[in-house]
Amino acid sequence: MVNLAAAFANEGISAFRFDFAGNGDSEGSFQYGNYYREVDDLRSVMQYFEQEKRPVTAIIGHSKGGNVVLFYASRFKDVDNVVNLSGRFDLRRGIEGRLGKDYLKRIKQYGFIDVANRKGNIEYRVTEESLMDRLTTDTSAACLLIPQTCRVLTIHGSGDKIVPTEDAMEFAKHIFNHKLHIIEGADHEYTSHQNELSSVVLNFVQSGSSHDNAQSENKSRRSFL
């Protein structure tokens, strides 16, 4: 996302990146689910730029952030362009790989599951409440609520081993004004495909800016790590 922000800067477009509460350098505790808490974080940022009279051209999210920007667009109608990078449509998938087998049984027994890294250090705790939040979050219903006036671009790598490309196809089926771009061979982080990623996103946002007659020096965008 740093390279993507730099690509926008080279085109004279402001890019603002931030960490959600409990992530990266932001304060607070990490939550496994709580997608709509992060929507509220994004809302606060959007309102700040609105107060500063800096129009937001587009919002961009990667992985979980991809879901967050889509959920934002479904709840608030103040964004015209959304970019979903490698978001997960079916939030029931990918859990066992992170929490292990019988995760539902264990979390109901103990109330939480601690997730450790390869060195055995605890990275974060998944509570039963946060897990249930993820399992009951309806991506399909949210996507159907995104207005047709909102342009949505989903980008996904064909070599993504974390979120399958089938999820990208589902977004295309459920969002009215949607464009899908598959980057051949790209992994979940677009490690070797940064240039193509930046080019596709930049073209999409710039075409949206022209369509909305929003070509101004104070354009502001949102990207997610």
Image (cartoon, rainbow, N blue to C red):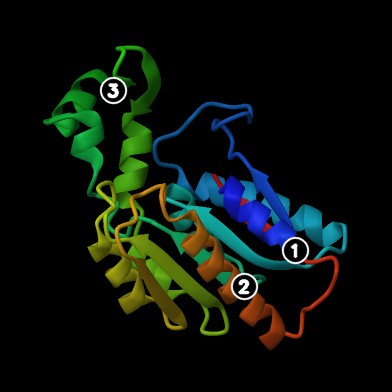
Question: Where's residue 57, x and y in %?
Answer: 70, 69
Asked whether residue 40 is in view, the answer is no
Tell me which amino acid carries mark 2.
Answer: Val
Tell me which amino acid carries mark 3.
Answer: Gly
* Left or right: residue 16 compared with residue 37: right
| Residue holding disc 2 | 205
Question: Where's residue 46, x and y in %?
Answer: 71, 57
Mark 1, residues whose alpha carbon is within 10 Å: few (<14), some, or many (≥20)?
A: many
* Left or right: residue 200 compared with residue 219: left
Q: Secondary structure at mark 3?
A: loop
Q: Secondary structure at mark 2?
A: helix
| Residue holding disc 3 | 111
| Residue holding disc 1 | 13
For the point 38% across and 36% down, the residue is 130
State the residue in front, 4 or 31: 4
Q: Quadrant of the C terminus?
A: top right
- Quote the CA–CA distance across marks 1 and 3: 46 Å
Q: Quadrant of residue 183?
A: bottom left
State the residue in front, 15 or 141: 15
For marks 3 and 2, the one nearer the N-term is 3
- Quote the CA–CA distance across marks 1 and 2: 10 Å
For the point 23% across and 30% down, the residue is 99
